Amino acid sequence: MPAVLESTTPKGLEGVVANQSAICYVFGEEGRLIYRGYDIHDLADHSTFEETAYLLLYGDLPKRDQLKTFTAAIKAAQKLPKAVQRIIKEAPRTAPPMDVLRTAVSAAVFVDPDRGDDSPAAESRKAIRLIAQFPTLVAAFHRLRSGQKPLAPRRGLNLAANLLYMMSGTLPDPEAAKAMDVALILHADHELNASTFAARVIAATLADMHGAVTGAMAALAGPLHGGANTEVMKMLLEIGTPDRTEAWVRAALAQKKKIMGFGHRVYRTEDPRAAHLRRMSEELARKAGQAHWFAIQQTLEDVMRREKGLYCNVDFYSASMYYVMGIPLDLYTPIFAVSRVSGWCAHVLEQHADNRLIRPRAEYVGAMNRTWTPLSRRA
Ligand code: COA
């Protein structure tokens, strides 16, 4: 008879501390977030995505020459290998971009120069390649499915601006490029969120970086995690106008529906990332003559706080910000991945640096001591 363990495990592992990490921490009660000890507000106000990615991967802010070398390494790895280009060319035009991105990342290992080498130096090079290739992959598939030729990354643009340029084919407005850079900083890591935990579990079997990132992508896609940003915009489009908002949200709550972009497993107050996204979304929406999205969102926030005591999360204002930038809805979650891959890679490196297999137990609640009967005698 199997030993039945005493139940100590809350559903969804709420509040469980599953491992140590020096990368990122969420202070849920206070609404604070730090990357490697730096407050997210400082990073959002002063850093760049490239610098933040370096910080997450290596633990310290880069010195000038270190940042130069890191940025050059990213630029050198932005072009997609032919084998990966073929995979996205052959994907059905109607495939969800997250599925295509996940498949392409998985396939990228076939031609990765460090394939099979799990030394820290090789893994670090793989991380740089993945960070570099994600924007090119997202943009290339988008252009192919729209009947356009993929564009090569443009010299002189940072990763965020290149992402916008390669998707649209036009040089981005500096305000939009800056907003995207900040959005990438804000999404880069978030402690043991579902996709990062998935990455660490995979990495802890000593599977490789591409495998861990592929698994993380699958976890990110779900609407309770990174897929929420697309769902937020669908909701805003369904609501349509500010005057319909209050009635719409009250009806949805009465039907016990989840309102996308609200709530969080850890934050008990406002998600600190939302403040930056709210400001940028409002500014860009006003500039684009689409201020009604902001008005709808303000009402949603008010009602959700009053009725449910819930605050918006990172997906709420990123959705409207991407929308007014003209980005198609199904690219919001891939853009989340463009940023979060830096966090996933940092966690894989940290896991491999001091590894132990992650293998928890289940609380068994199934049947016991049953007697096997032959098929012919089963009623
Ligand atoms: N809309 C309406 N009610 C919500 C809600 C939301 N977005 N999020 C949580 N709640 C309510 C639940 O209905 C539940 O109420 P109850 O106790 O009366 O049943 C309570 O708040 C706790 O929610 P629960 O789903 O158990 O919290 P969780 O920690 O398991 O889930 C999320 C966290 C993020 C998955 C959840 O808040 C959610 O589904 N949000 C919408 C999706 C989203 O925006 N995801 C992105 C997260 S960054």
Image (tube, helix red, strand yellow):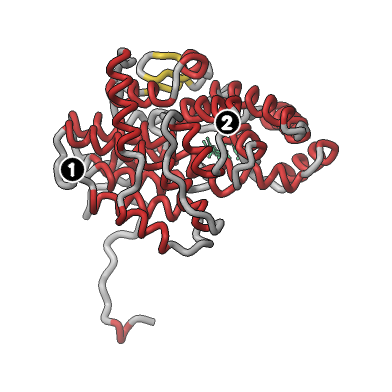
Dividing the picture into quadrants, the one containing residue 66 is top left
- Compared to residue 105, the image places residue 297 above or below, namely above
User: Number of marks in the image?
Assistant: 2
Dividing the picture into quadrants, the one containing residue 12 is top left
Seen in the image, is 152 located left or right of residue 113? Answer: right
Q: Quadrant of the C terminus?
A: bottom left
Expressed as whole percent of the image width and height from the top left, the position of residue 30 reads 52, 16
Seen in the image, is 256 located left or right of residue 292? Answer: left
Amino acid type assigned to the residue bearing label 1 in the image: Asp
Tag 1 residue = 114
Amino acid type assigned to the residue bearing label 2 in the image: Asn
| Gap between marks 2 and 1 measured at Cα | 37 Å
Expressed as whole percent of the image width and height from the top left, the position of residue 85 reads 36, 55
Q: Residue furthest front?
A: 155
Q: Quadrant of the N terminus?
A: bottom left
On whether ligand 1 comes within 8 Å of the CB at mark 2, the answer is: yes
- Compared to residue 243, the image places residue 217 above or below, namely below
Mark 2–mark 1 CB contact (< 8 Å): no
> Which numbered disc, 2 or 1, marks the residue that appears first in the sequence?
1
Ligand 1's quadrant is top right
Q: Residue at x 28, y 45 (%)?
A: 210
Q: Residue at x 48, y 38 (%)?
A: 163
- Compared to residue 92, the image places residue 321 above or below, namely above
Q: Nearer the viewer, residue 256 or 302?
A: 302
Q: Is residue 280 visible?
A: yes
Tag 2 residue = 313
Marker disc for residue 28: none
Q: Residue at x 36, y 59 (%)?
A: 87
**Label 1 neighbourhood size at 10 Å, few (<14), some (14-19), many (20+)?**
some
